[in-house]
Image (spheres, rainbow, N blue to C red):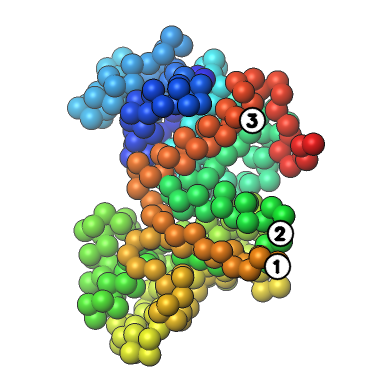
Amino acid sequence: MRLVLAGFGVVGQSFARLLLEEEKELAGRYGLVPMVVGIVDRSGWLVDEQGIDVRRALKSKKETGKVSKSANSAGKPADVIRDIEAEVLVEATPTNFKTGEPGFSFMKAAFESKKHVVTCNKGPVSLAYAALHELARHNGVELRFSGAVGGGTPVLDFGKTCSTGDELVGIRGILNGTCNYILTRMEEEGIPFEQALREAQKAGYAEADPSLDIDGYDTAVKLVITANHLLMSRAGINDVKIKGIRGISSKEVLARKEQGKAIRLVASVTRERGLTVQPTVLERGHPLCISGANNAVEFECRYSGPKVIIGKGAGGPETATSLLRDLLEIRGNFNGSAATVPAYGTEVA
Ligand SMILES: NC(=O)c1ccc[n+]([C@@H]2O[C@H](COP(=O)([O-])OP(=O)(O)OC[C@H]3O[C@@H](n4cnc5c(N)ncnc54)[C@H](OP(=O)(O)O)[C@@H]3O)[C@@H](O)[C@H]2O)c1
């Protein structure tokens, strides 16, 4: 299976390392022999249709910031992605919540040249969920994005399984590890919000500009993807009522703690009440009342009741496993041939 990697940062490099570390297992257990034929980053691209030496590319990236001294930058990366002979684009460029770029153009180029796409990039998937699926279907290929929600924790796949043979009536969860870390630290140490935020930045959980996390936007985008994927809704970010955790005082957090409760940033969707992201008081023993930078999602099923999945919501090696899981599913579905691809959304007998 020939792969093009777009984005060779924390997740892209972790994915490349995972391919190397699991080489024997992938071949022996799944018959998957991946060959990286292109790597695209901000500085340009390296293409070798005979297969790139991934170890060397990782070393070069570490030492020089480029995948190779001979990396090219003449032309457009989307054209490079379109023209490379490959089966799958593994897309891990930064999330852009407003335009979805550059991921959106890369995915479009991949679909138009009959390549499957696996991605962990929330931007394009949340902005153009239906259009991307339509484009994939039109070209007889697949779009997979399990790493876009929950990092390495298979939230979307678990939700899909819950809804098979049952009906999902609601989903609610903790989808942003940074907010959860901040609230947990405020609760454990009685420290103010600003101090807990600085700790989260120091620990590498929060960005230098953490507003997308603490104002609830990142959670809302993941909720939109989850709702569209699992409840077949056509939601956009403007359909979500959003309130973040900025302004929550340690006094409030400690008062809830005294009552055996805790405040968490909870994303929720039901058909009746729509989509919301807001600080919510939970009983301490509630399965969603998790600590630290974790994620937890509860799926409420009409017949079989609630089910909860908990795990790390981010991290390079963790998120790389989602990309690999998606790749293996594509491999399983298509057995290496795009000719037998069932259309997205069609029922397979
Ligand atoms: N990190 C996580 O824990 C995590 C978890 C879940 C989902 N995600 C998602 O995964 C994606 C990647 O995250 P990351 O942490 O790996 O980010 P990152 O470390 O910043 O890496 C981004 C990569 O994309 C490349 N890039 C940026 N702009 C580009 C452009 N215009 N054209 C081509 N390449 C470009 C960068 O190139 P340079 O190397 O040259 O700068 C870099 O290699 C994001 O969408 C993120 O939301 C990340």
- Residue highlighted by disc 3: 333
Task: Write the residue at 34% across / 25% down.
Answer: 20
Q: Position of residue 85 (x, y in %)?
A: 54, 15
Task: Please rate how many residues cluster around mark 2, counting C-alpha atoms within 10 Å: few if below 14, some from 14 to 19, many from 20.
Answer: some
Q: Amino acid at mark 3?
A: Asn
Residue contact at pointers 2 and 1, CB within 8 angstroms: yes
Task: Write the residue at 49% across / 59% down.
Answer: 309
Q: Amino acid at mark 2?
A: Asp
- Specify the quadrant of the image occupied by residue 170: bottom right
* Residue 189, above or below 9: below
- Residue highlighted by disc 2: 166
The residue tagged with tag 3: helix, strand or loop? helix
One can see residue 188 in this view: yes
| Mark 1 or mark 3: whose residue is earlier in sequence | 1
The residue tagged with tag 2: helix, strand or loop? loop
Residue contact at pointers 2 and 3, CB within 8 angstroms: no
